[in-house]
Image: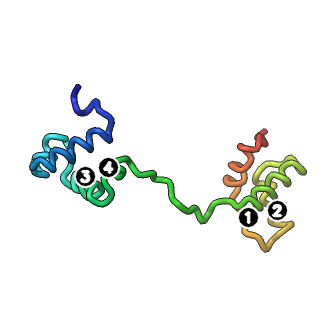
């Protein structure tokens, strides 16, 4: 089985093993068709935490400061159920009702509707 058909984690393990057996980074780059920068990244990750670090890291942020709070989401859903309006008109009404709160954009209000089955 060619090495490119192997799972990515197995490919990285083979790369680490080849390096530990004395293969140079330049030779590894040619063998595995990777940049030296990528090889150094995987060697550093392996040295840092071992085999567990050879899997791809999640790209999702740990914190989303602009995420709609549950309180705001509930207010949007309640307004939609009460008036049956679209996102543009709902945003205008919510801003009238509570001008102290920073209400989300029209597109965000529309995206809040979808999981609640509130689309037209």
Taking the spot 28% from the left edge, 54% from the top edge, the residue there is 46
Cα–Cα span, label 3 and label 4? 16 Å
Which residue is more in the foreground, 82 or 52? Answer: 52
Q: Residue at (80%, 71%) from the top-left corner?
A: 99
Residue under the image location 20 percent in, 50 percent down: 35
**Mark 2 vs mark 1, CA separation in Å:** 7 Å
Callout 2 environment at 10 Å: few (<14), some (14 to 19), or many (20+)? some
Marks 4 & 1, CB-CB < 8 Å contact: no
Q: Residue 44 in the image: state x and y as whole percent.
A: 26, 58
Q: Which residue is mark 2?
A: 94
Give the Cα separation between the discs numbered 4 and 1.
Answer: 45 Å
Camera-near label (4 vs 1) is: 4
Residue 43's place in the image compared with 31, above or below, is below
Position of the N terminus, as image quadrant, is: top left
The residue mark sitting in front, 3 or 2, is 3
Q: In the displayed structure, does residue 43 sit left or right of residue 55?
A: left
Residue at the disc numbered 3: 38
Q: Which residue is mark 4?
A: 51
């Amino acid at each position: 089985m060619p090495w490119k058909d192997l799972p990515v984690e197995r490919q990285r393990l083979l790369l680490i093993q080849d390096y530990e057996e004395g293969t140079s980074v330049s030779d590894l780059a040619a063998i595995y068709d990777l940049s030296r920068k990528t090889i150094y990244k995987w060697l550093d990750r392996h040295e840092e935490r071992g085999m567990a670090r050879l899997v791809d890291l999640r790209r999702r942020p740990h914190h989303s400061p602009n995420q709609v709070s549950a309180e705001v989401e509930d207010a949007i859903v309640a307004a939609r159920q009460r008036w049956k309006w679209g996102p543009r008109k709902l945003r205008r009404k919510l801003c009238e009702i509570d001008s102290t709160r920073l209400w989300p954009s029209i597109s965000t209000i529309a995206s809040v509707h979808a999981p609640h089955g509130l689309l037209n």
